[in-house]
Image (tube, grey):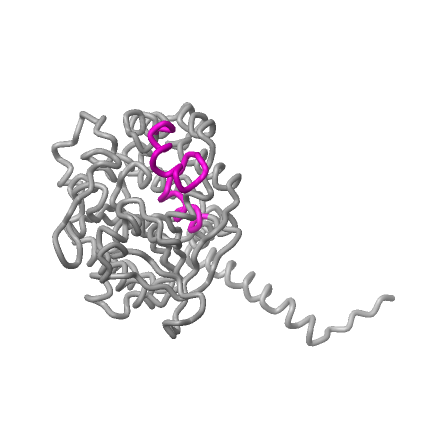
Amino acid sequence: MELHIFTLSNFLLYFPCVILIHLLCFMIKKFRVTVPNLLILQTTMSKKQVIIDTDCGIDDAQAILMALAAPNVELLAVTCVFGNTAVENVCQNVLRVLSVCEREGIPVFQGCAGPLVGANNLCTDHFGGDGLGDVLEDRDPRWKEKIQKENAVNAMIRLVTEHQNQVSLVALGPLSNLALAVRLDPCFPQKLKELFIMGGNMEGIGNVTLCAEFNFAMDPESAYVVLEEFLCPTYVASWEYSCRNSLTWEFFEELMGQDEPAAAFMKKITSKCWAYSKEAMRNKRDVYFSPGFVSYDAYAMAACVDSSVVTETIRCPVRVELQGSISRGMMALDRTNELKKSHSVHILTKCDVEKFARLLLASVQQPQKK
C-alpha cells in the first residue's frame, strides 16, 4: 500500500488550482459563462494594448499593417500628427489603411498640425504631397465624419488613464502629440507600459538635415521633452538602426508581389515614390549604409509586436540638441554619463532580420480570410 504524505509544498502547489476550478464553476453557474466565452476572454486579456501615433506616410502605412496583422495586438486607437504631410492628409491616409484591412472600427483621432514651437515646415518630398505617393485618386469627401471628435492628445491621455500600465505607445512621427500630452497631464508617461519611438540618430548622420533625422528635426522641442520627461521603459529605433538592418531589394519585390489587397495597396503607393527606388537611393542613403530596402517605421512596430526581433541594444541616457545651427534635432547618446541623468533609454542596434521579414510578409497578407 502506497502512502501519500500531504506536505506544505503539495498544499502550495495544488491550492491555487483548486481555487481556480471553484472560480470557473461559480462563473459558469452564476453568470452562465460558456467555455468558448472564457477562451475569448483569455485571448483578449493576453493581447498587448497598443496606441499608434503616426504622421502616416508610406512606411507608417506598412507599420500600421504590421500591427493589424499581429494576433497578439489589440489596437486601441490611431492618433494623427503632422509630419510626412498635413495632419488632414494623415487622417485620411490612416482611414484608407484601416479600410484596406476591413478594420474601420478602430477609432482615429486628429492631433497636432504643427510643432510645439516655431513654424511648420512641412517636408513633402519623401513620400509625395499626400504622404502616400500621390497616386490615390478616389479620396473620400466624407472623411471628416469618420474621424473622432475628440482631439488626439485628449484621447491619448484618456485611453492611457483608463488602461494604466497596460498601453504600449508606438510613436512613428514627430513627437508633438506626446509632448503636449505630458504638458496637459504630467503623470501621463508613468501611466504607460512602454514607449516605442521611430526617430533620432546615434552618430550625427542626418536624413533631412546634415545631422538630424526627419521626425526629430520636424519638432526638436517635442523630441527633447519626450526623451527628458517620459520615464517609462523607452525603446528608440533610430535612423541608423533601420538602415543597418535593411532587407534586400529582391525581398521588396517579393513583398509587393503577394496576392492580397494590402500588398496591392502597398505596391500602388510605392510605385512612383523615389524613396522606394533602388537607383534613387544610391546617391542618398547608400552613401552611408549598405544598399537595401528599408521600411523605417516598421522597425519600431516590430519591436513592439515581437520583442525577440531586437537582438542587441545600448542602454544609456540621451539628449536632443536644440541650439546648434547644424546639429539642431540631433540625438546625442551619453554612454559615459556626462549628463548625470538618472533615466536611460534603450537604443536598438541589431535585429533578427529574418523574423522582421516574416512580420512584413504577414502585414501585407490582409484582410485576413475568415
* Image position of 80 (left or right of 239): left
The image position of residue 208, as x and y in percent, is 27, 45
Pick the front one: 83 or 262: 83
117 lies left or right of 349 = left
In the rendered structure, the answer to whether residue 10 lies left or right of residue 209 reads right
- Looking at the image, is 38 positioned above or below residue 320? above
Locate residue 94, reporting x and y percent. Answer: 25, 40
Q: Is residue 211 above or below residue 335?
A: above
Nearest the camera: 110 or 41?
110
Which corner quadrant holds the N terminus?
bottom right
Residue shown at 12% from the left, 52% from the top: 119
Residue 268 x/y as whole percent: 30, 25
Residue lying at 15% horizontally and 47% vertically, measured from the top left: 121
Residue 125's spot in the image, x, y percent?
Answer: 22, 36
Q: Is residue 243 magenta?
A: no
Please give the count of numbered marks on the rendered protein.
0
Q: Is residue 278 magenta?
A: yes
Quadrant that contains the C terminus: top left
Among all residues in the image, which is located at the extreme right?
Answer: 1
Determine the residue positioned at 20% across, 42% down.
Answer: 123
- Residue 338 occupies which quadrant of the picture? bottom left
The answer to which quarter of the image holds residue 166 is bottom left
Magenta region: which residues? 277-305
